[in-house]
Image: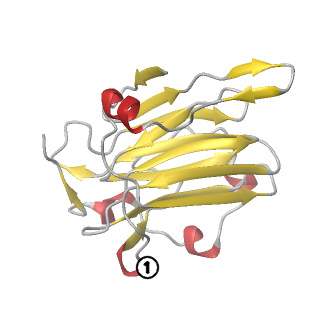
Amino acid sequence: MKVERLAIPDVILVTPPRFSDNRGFFSETYNFDRMTEAGINLPFVQDNQSLSCEKGVVRGLHCQLAPYEQGKLVRVTRGAIWDVAVDARTGSPTYGQWVAAELSAENWSQLWVPPGFLHGFVTLEENTEVQYKCTSLYSKVSERAVIWNCPDLNIDWPIAEEEAILSDKDKIAPHFSAAKGWFSYEK
């Protein structure tokens, strides 16, 4: 398994190997021991899957507050996304900074987004399926969002604002300043 720490070292890009032959391929997409060695050592309690039918669907930026903070291990099984993690941990040396990676069915990479981070993505292809493992169960009362194109974050999205397809909820999400104090940083 290839492991790459991104510019925010707590965010990790992992790429499991694929073993191909004339029938197709086999891949072990999750192995507790290997993920622990890579620095991903929280238990997963929920799996989610989304299908975005159109290119340009933006989901996020989302998170959940304590005691339901979620770490997410995100992968794409069909299509492609540009996946973003924003450090929302007050006191962190990378607070307010973001990193991104392209995840696709072709490159087979997965992104570890730790608890205390905002997470979002934009689909780069039609009919994109995203699957992610979560370290905490969904909690409606704990969910929070920040507007995807917040000028305070200056995320370099690979899509024009007028092309973005958003949910009604994501269209009215607050700016990043609202996230101050949502999470604290612990070394």
For the C terminus, the quadrant is top left
In front here: 49 or 95? 49
How many other residues sit within 10 Å of disc 1, few (<14), some (14-19) or many (≥20)?
few
Q: Is residue 84 left or right of residue 12?
A: right
The residue under label 1 is which amino acid type? Lys
Place of residue 49 in the rendered image (x, y in percent of width and height, measured from the top left): 63, 58
Q: Does 39 sit above or below residue 168?
A: above
Visible residue check, residue 150:
no
How many numbered marks appear? 1
Residue 6, above or below 144: above
Task: Give the residue pinned by disc 1.
Answer: 140
Is 122 left or right of 170, judged from the image as shown? right
Q: Residue at x 56, y 36 (%)?
A: 29
User: Considering depth in this image, is 10 or 175 the residue closer to the camera?
Assistant: 10
Residue drawn at the location 74% of the way across and 57% of the way down: 52
**Callout 1: SS:** helix
The residue under the point 72% across, 60% down is: 165
Look at the picture and state if 19 lies above or below 78: above
